[in-house]
Protein backbone atom coordinates (compact mmCIF):
# COMPACT_ATOMS: atom_id res chain seq x y z
CA UNK A 1 0.00 0.00 0.00
CA UNK A 2 2.79 2.46 0.94
CA UNK A 3 4.51 1.84 -2.39
CA UNK A 4 1.34 2.65 -4.34
CA UNK A 5 0.71 5.81 -2.29
CA UNK A 6 4.22 7.14 -2.90
CA UNK A 7 3.95 6.14 -6.56
CA UNK A 8 0.87 8.31 -6.93
CA UNK A 9 2.43 11.18 -4.95
CA UNK A 10 5.49 11.07 -7.21
CA UNK A 11 3.31 12.44 -10.02
CA UNK A 12 1.50 14.96 -7.83
CA UNK A 13 3.77 16.70 -5.32
CA UNK A 14 6.88 14.54 -4.70
CA UNK A 15 8.34 14.02 -8.17
CA UNK A 16 11.75 12.64 -7.18
CA UNK A 17 11.45 11.61 -3.54
CA UNK A 18 8.09 9.93 -4.13
CA UNK A 19 9.49 7.82 -6.94
CA UNK A 20 12.46 6.68 -4.86
CA UNK A 21 10.28 5.77 -1.88
CA UNK A 22 7.77 3.95 -4.10
CA UNK A 23 10.52 1.74 -5.55
CA UNK A 24 12.09 1.16 -2.12
CA UNK A 25 8.83 0.09 -0.44
CA UNK A 26 7.91 -2.13 -3.39
CA UNK A 27 11.26 -3.93 -3.31
CA UNK A 28 10.96 -4.49 0.43
CA UNK A 29 7.46 -5.94 0.00
CA UNK A 30 8.49 -8.21 -2.88
CA UNK A 31 11.56 -9.48 -1.00
CA UNK A 32 9.50 -10.99 1.81
CA UNK A 33 9.45 -14.75 1.73
CA UNK A 34 5.96 -15.11 3.13
CA UNK A 35 3.02 -14.27 0.98
CA UNK A 36 1.30 -11.15 2.11
CA UNK A 37 -1.71 -9.25 0.98
CA UNK A 38 -1.15 -6.23 -1.20
CA UNK A 39 1.37 -7.79 -3.57
CA UNK A 40 -0.49 -6.31 -6.50
CA UNK A 41 -0.44 -2.88 -4.90
CA UNK A 42 3.32 -3.15 -4.40
CA UNK A 43 3.78 -4.05 -8.06
CA UNK A 44 1.65 -1.09 -9.12
CA UNK A 45 3.65 1.22 -6.85
CA UNK A 46 6.91 -0.17 -8.24
CA UNK A 47 5.75 0.49 -11.79
CA UNK A 48 4.70 4.07 -10.99
CA UNK A 49 7.99 4.72 -9.19
CA UNK A 50 10.07 3.40 -12.08
CA UNK A 51 8.11 5.44 -14.62
CA UNK A 52 8.50 8.57 -12.48
CA UNK A 53 12.26 8.11 -12.11
CA UNK A 54 12.59 7.48 -15.84
CA UNK A 55 10.74 10.71 -16.59
CA UNK A 56 12.95 12.63 -14.14
CA UNK A 57 16.11 11.21 -15.72
CA UNK A 58 14.84 12.15 -19.17
CA UNK A 59 14.10 15.71 -18.06
CA UNK A 60 17.51 15.98 -16.41
CA UNK A 61 19.11 14.75 -19.62
CA UNK A 62 17.43 17.58 -21.49
CA UNK A 63 17.74 20.39 -18.95
CA UNK A 64 21.36 19.93 -17.85
CA UNK A 65 22.85 20.33 -21.36
CA UNK A 66 20.62 23.34 -21.97
CA UNK A 67 21.76 24.84 -18.67
CA UNK A 68 25.40 24.37 -19.60
CA UNK A 69 24.71 26.00 -22.97
CA UNK A 70 22.94 29.06 -21.57
CA UNK A 71 25.21 29.68 -18.56
CA UNK A 72 28.40 31.65 -19.04
CA UNK A 73 31.02 33.38 -16.96
CA UNK A 74 29.81 35.91 -14.43
CA UNK A 75 29.92 39.36 -16.01
CA UNK A 76 29.44 42.85 -14.61
CA UNK A 77 28.43 45.67 -16.94
CA UNK A 78 27.63 49.30 -16.20
CA UNK A 79 25.28 51.63 -18.03
CA UNK A 80 24.72 55.36 -17.58
CA UNK A 81 22.11 57.68 -19.02
CA UNK A 82 22.29 61.49 -18.97
CA UNK A 83 19.09 63.55 -18.68
CA UNK A 84 19.69 65.13 -22.12
CA UNK A 85 17.59 68.15 -21.20
CA UNK A 86 14.71 66.25 -19.59
CA UNK A 87 12.85 68.26 -16.95
CA UNK A 88 11.12 65.13 -15.63
CA UNK A 89 11.44 61.41 -16.31
CA UNK A 90 9.41 58.22 -16.49
CA UNK A 91 11.55 55.20 -15.57
CA UNK A 92 10.42 51.61 -16.15
CA UNK A 93 12.36 48.62 -14.80
CA UNK A 94 11.62 45.01 -15.76
CA UNK A 95 13.48 42.30 -13.86
CA UNK A 96 12.23 38.72 -14.17
CA UNK A 97 14.55 37.00 -11.69
CA UNK A 98 17.39 37.70 -9.30
CA UNK A 99 17.81 40.69 -6.99
CA UNK A 100 17.39 44.40 -7.61
CA UNK A 101 18.41 47.38 -5.49
CA UNK A 102 17.17 50.82 -6.52
CA UNK A 103 18.35 54.01 -4.82
CA UNK A 104 19.29 57.62 -5.42
CA UNK A 105 22.63 59.33 -5.85
CA UNK A 106 23.21 59.11 -9.62
CA UNK A 107 25.27 61.89 -11.18
CA UNK A 108 23.17 61.69 -14.34
CA UNK A 109 19.64 60.41 -14.69
CA UNK A 110 20.52 56.72 -14.43
CA UNK A 111 23.46 54.59 -13.34
CA UNK A 112 23.17 50.81 -13.47
CA UNK A 113 25.55 48.04 -12.43
CA UNK A 114 24.41 44.62 -13.62
CA UNK A 115 25.99 41.29 -12.63
CA UNK A 116 24.75 38.12 -14.33
CA UNK A 117 25.92 34.71 -15.55
CA UNK A 118 23.29 33.84 -18.15
CA UNK A 119 24.53 34.98 -21.54
CA UNK A 120 21.27 36.48 -22.74
CA UNK A 121 20.42 38.35 -19.53
CA UNK A 122 22.38 41.50 -20.32
CA UNK A 123 19.85 44.32 -19.82
CA UNK A 124 18.43 46.35 -22.68
CA UNK A 125 18.13 50.13 -22.21
CA UNK A 126 16.07 52.54 -24.24
CA UNK A 127 15.84 56.30 -23.63
CA UNK A 128 14.22 59.18 -25.47
CA UNK A 129 13.25 62.77 -24.61
CA UNK A 130 10.09 64.38 -25.95
CA UNK A 131 8.54 67.62 -24.78
CA UNK A 132 10.84 67.89 -21.78
CA UNK A 133 9.96 64.38 -20.56
CA UNK A 134 12.53 61.61 -20.63
CA UNK A 135 11.30 58.02 -20.95
CA UNK A 136 13.74 55.33 -19.85
CA UNK A 137 13.20 51.58 -20.05
CA UNK A 138 15.63 49.05 -18.56
CA UNK A 139 14.68 45.41 -19.13
CA UNK A 140 16.36 42.11 -18.40
CA UNK A 141 17.46 40.51 -21.65
CA UNK A 142 16.61 37.08 -22.97
CA UNK A 143 13.32 35.24 -22.67
CA UNK A 144 11.43 33.78 -19.73
CA UNK A 145 13.40 30.50 -19.55
CA UNK A 146 15.95 30.20 -16.74
CA UNK A 147 18.36 27.24 -16.40
CA UNK A 148 17.21 24.81 -13.74
CA UNK A 149 19.38 22.80 -11.31
CA UNK A 150 22.19 25.33 -11.67
CA UNK A 151 23.21 28.46 -9.80
CA UNK A 152 22.13 31.53 -11.72
CA UNK A 153 22.85 35.13 -10.84
CA UNK A 154 21.21 38.36 -11.86
CA UNK A 155 21.92 41.33 -9.58
CA UNK A 156 20.89 44.87 -10.42
CA UNK A 157 22.13 47.99 -8.66
CA UNK A 158 20.30 51.00 -10.06
CA UNK A 159 20.86 54.61 -9.02
CA UNK A 160 18.58 57.42 -10.14
CA UNK A 161 18.95 61.19 -10.10
CA UNK A 162 17.97 63.01 -6.91
CA UNK A 163 17.26 66.18 -8.89
CA UNK A 164 15.07 65.14 -11.83
CA UNK A 165 11.42 64.49 -10.86
CA UNK A 166 10.72 60.81 -11.52
CA UNK A 167 7.72 58.55 -12.02
CA UNK A 168 9.11 55.07 -11.32
CA UNK A 169 7.56 51.71 -12.15
CA UNK A 170 9.02 48.22 -11.71
CA UNK A 171 7.83 44.84 -12.97
CA UNK A 172 9.65 42.18 -10.97
CA UNK A 173 8.11 38.81 -11.78
CA UNK A 174 10.05 36.47 -9.43
CA UNK A 175 12.86 38.89 -8.53
CA UNK A 176 13.28 40.30 -5.03
CA UNK A 177 13.89 44.02 -4.69
CA UNK A 178 14.85 46.78 -2.28
CA UNK A 179 13.86 50.38 -3.06
CA UNK A 180 15.62 53.10 -1.04
CA UNK A 181 14.14 56.20 -2.62
CA UNK A 182 14.07 58.78 0.17
CA UNK A 183 16.51 61.12 -1.59
CA UNK A 184 14.69 61.15 -4.94
CA UNK A 185 12.34 63.78 -6.32
CA UNK A 186 9.80 60.98 -6.61
CA UNK A 187 6.35 61.75 -7.98
CA UNK A 188 4.90 58.25 -8.11
CA UNK A 189 5.92 54.65 -7.53
CA UNK A 190 4.36 51.52 -9.00
CA UNK A 191 5.72 48.04 -8.23
CA UNK A 192 4.25 44.79 -9.52
CA UNK A 193 5.83 41.60 -8.17
CA UNK A 194 4.92 37.98 -8.74
CA UNK A 195 6.98 36.32 -6.04
CA UNK A 196 9.97 37.43 -4.01
CA UNK A 197 10.28 39.91 -1.18
CA UNK A 198 9.79 43.62 -1.80
CA UNK A 199 11.09 46.32 0.55
CA UNK A 200 10.28 49.99 -0.10
CA UNK A 201 11.73 52.87 1.94
CA UNK A 202 10.40 56.34 1.14
CA UNK A 203 11.64 57.98 4.34
CA UNK A 204 12.89 61.26 2.94
CA UNK A 205 11.67 64.75 2.15
CA UNK A 206 9.14 63.81 -0.50
CA UNK A 207 7.75 67.14 -1.66
CA UNK A 208 6.33 65.79 -4.95
CA UNK A 209 5.12 62.31 -4.03
CA UNK A 210 1.46 61.78 -4.94
CA UNK A 211 0.88 58.08 -5.56
CA UNK A 212 2.12 54.67 -4.37
CA UNK A 213 0.87 51.45 -5.95
CA UNK A 214 2.34 48.13 -4.76
CA UNK A 215 1.08 44.73 -5.89
CA UNK A 216 2.59 41.45 -4.72
CA UNK A 217 1.63 37.87 -5.59
CA UNK A 218 3.46 36.12 -2.78
CA UNK A 219 6.25 36.99 -0.36
CA UNK A 220 7.00 39.58 2.29
CA UNK A 221 6.12 43.19 1.52
CA UNK A 222 7.26 46.19 3.56
CA UNK A 223 6.70 49.92 3.03
CA UNK A 224 8.22 52.66 5.16
CA UNK A 225 6.82 56.21 5.03
CA UNK A 226 8.70 57.93 7.85
CA UNK A 227 9.71 61.04 5.96
CA UNK A 228 8.06 64.38 5.17
CA UNK A 229 5.17 64.48 2.70
CA UNK A 230 3.91 67.81 1.39
CA UNK A 231 1.13 66.59 -0.91
CA UNK A 232 -1.88 64.37 -0.49
CA UNK A 233 -0.72 60.80 -1.13
CA UNK A 234 -2.85 57.99 -2.54
CA UNK A 235 -1.55 54.58 -1.44
CA UNK A 236 -2.76 51.20 -2.77
CA UNK A 237 -1.12 48.03 -1.48
CA UNK A 238 -2.09 44.46 -2.33
CA UNK A 239 -0.41 41.25 -1.19
CA UNK A 240 -2.08 37.98 -2.13
CA UNK A 241 0.03 35.80 0.16
CA UNK A 242 2.67 36.79 2.68
CA UNK A 243 3.42 39.13 5.55
CA UNK A 244 2.74 42.84 5.00
CA UNK A 245 4.24 45.65 7.08
CA UNK A 246 3.48 49.34 6.50
CA UNK A 247 4.90 52.21 8.55
CA UNK A 248 3.09 55.56 8.20
CA UNK A 249 4.82 57.37 11.09
CA UNK A 250 6.07 60.28 8.99
CA UNK A 251 5.19 63.98 8.94
CA UNK A 252 2.08 64.58 6.87
CA UNK A 253 1.03 67.97 5.51
CA UNK A 254 -1.46 66.90 2.85
CA UNK A 255 -2.91 63.71 4.28
CA UNK A 256 -3.20 60.20 2.90
CA UNK A 257 -5.85 57.92 1.43
CA UNK A 258 -4.89 54.27 1.59
CA UNK A 259 -6.30 50.92 0.58
CA UNK A 260 -4.61 47.72 1.79
CA UNK A 261 -5.81 44.32 0.61
CA UNK A 262 -4.27 41.05 1.78
CA UNK A 263 -5.31 37.52 0.89
CA UNK A 264 -3.45 35.51 3.50
CA UNK A 265 -0.70 36.59 5.87
CA UNK A 266 -0.24 38.84 8.88
CA UNK A 267 -0.54 42.61 8.51
CA UNK A 268 1.17 45.22 10.71
CA UNK A 269 0.22 48.89 10.31
CA UNK A 270 2.21 51.48 12.28
CA UNK A 271 0.49 54.86 12.62
CA UNK A 272 1.39 58.40 13.77
CA UNK A 273 0.01 60.15 16.84
CA UNK A 274 0.41 63.78 15.71
CA UNK A 275 -2.20 63.71 12.92
CA UNK A 276 -5.65 62.20 12.76
CA UNK A 277 -5.92 58.56 11.72
CA UNK A 278 -9.00 56.58 10.75
CA UNK A 279 -8.69 52.89 9.80
CA UNK A 280 -11.59 50.76 8.61
CA UNK A 281 -10.86 47.05 9.03
CA UNK A 282 -12.61 44.17 7.30
CA UNK A 283 -11.25 40.78 8.35
CA UNK A 284 -12.24 37.23 7.49
CA UNK A 285 -10.29 35.30 10.10
CA UNK A 286 -7.42 36.04 12.45
CA UNK A 287 -6.79 38.14 15.52
CA UNK A 288 -7.00 41.93 15.60
CA UNK A 289 -4.87 43.95 18.00
CA UNK A 290 -5.17 47.74 18.24
CA UNK A 291 -2.60 49.67 20.29
CA UNK A 292 -3.18 53.39 20.80
CA UNK A 293 -6.36 53.18 18.71
CA UNK A 294 -10.01 53.31 19.83
CA UNK A 295 -12.95 51.48 18.29
CA UNK A 296 -15.15 54.25 16.88
CA UNK A 297 -17.88 52.24 15.16
CA UNK A 298 -18.69 48.76 13.90
CA UNK A 299 -21.13 47.67 11.21
CA UNK A 300 -21.45 45.33 8.22
CA UNK A 301 -18.76 47.31 6.40
CA UNK A 302 -16.20 46.64 9.10
CA UNK A 303 -14.78 48.09 12.29
CA UNK A 304 -13.52 51.67 12.39
CA UNK A 305 -10.58 52.58 14.63
CA UNK A 306 -9.37 56.13 15.28
CA UNK A 307 -6.53 57.70 17.23
CA UNK A 308 -6.72 60.52 19.78
CA UNK A 309 -5.95 63.22 17.18
CA UNK A 310 -8.80 62.23 14.89
CA UNK A 311 -11.41 65.03 14.51
CA UNK A 312 -8.90 67.42 16.14
CA UNK A 313 -6.13 67.48 13.55
CA UNK A 314 -6.49 69.40 10.24
CA UNK A 315 -4.68 66.51 8.53
CA UNK A 316 -6.14 63.00 8.37
CA UNK A 317 -4.87 59.64 7.21
CA UNK A 318 -7.77 57.49 5.94
CA UNK A 319 -7.00 53.79 5.46
CA UNK A 320 -9.22 50.89 4.40
CA UNK A 321 -7.72 47.53 5.34
CA UNK A 322 -9.18 44.29 4.01
CA UNK A 323 -7.66 40.98 5.04
CA UNK A 324 -9.09 37.57 4.23
CA UNK A 325 -6.91 35.48 6.55
CA UNK A 326 -4.22 36.52 9.02
CA UNK A 327 -3.56 38.51 12.17
CA UNK A 328 -3.84 42.30 12.05
CA UNK A 329 -1.89 44.72 14.25
CA UNK A 330 -2.66 48.46 14.41
CA UNK A 331 -0.09 50.37 16.45
CA UNK A 332 -0.18 54.16 16.96
CA UNK A 333 2.89 56.00 18.22
CA UNK A 334 6.47 54.99 18.68
Image (cartoon, helix red, strand yellow):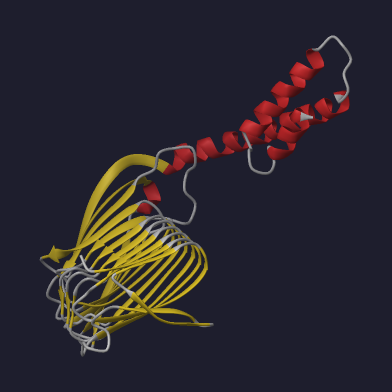
Whether residue 81 is visible, yes or no, is no
- Would you place residue 310 above or below residue 203 in this image? below
> Which one is nearer the viewer's eye here, 326 or 113?
326
Q: Where does the image place residue 290, in percent across and percent down from the top left?
A: 36, 68
Q: Residue furthest top?
A: 33
Most foreground residue, 186 or 97 = 186
Which quadrant does the C terminus fall into? bottom left
- Quarter assignment of residue 198: bottom left
325 left or right of 190 in image: right
Residue at 39% from the left image edge and 43% from the top image edge: 152
* Place of residue 9 in the rendered image (x, y in percent of width and height, measured from the top left): 69, 39
Q: Residue at x 73, y 23 (%)?
A: 25
Task: State the image quarter where residue 44 is shown.
Answer: top right
User: In the picture, residue 310 is in which quadrant?
Assistant: bottom left
| Residue toward you, 152 or 37 | 37
Q: Is residue 313 above or below residue 198?
A: below
Q: Is residue 136 left or right of residue 285?
A: left
Image point (87%, 11%), residue name: 34
Q: Image height check: is 305 above or below 99?
A: below
Instruction: Please name the residue shown 36% across and 55% down the image.
Output: 176
Residue 70 image point, x, y percent: 44, 43
Q: Which of 8 and 250 lies nearest the eye of the viewer?
A: 250
Amino acid sequence: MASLVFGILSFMCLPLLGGILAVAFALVARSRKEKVRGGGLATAGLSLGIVNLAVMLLLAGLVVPLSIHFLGKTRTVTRTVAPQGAERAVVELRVRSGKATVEGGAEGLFEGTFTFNVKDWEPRLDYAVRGGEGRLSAAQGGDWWAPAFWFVRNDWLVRLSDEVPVDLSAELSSASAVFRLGSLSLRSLEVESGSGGVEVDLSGKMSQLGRIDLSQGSGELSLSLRGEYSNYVQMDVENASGRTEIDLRGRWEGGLGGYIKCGSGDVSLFLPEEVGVRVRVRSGSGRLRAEGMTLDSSDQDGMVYVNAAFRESPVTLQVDLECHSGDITLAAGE
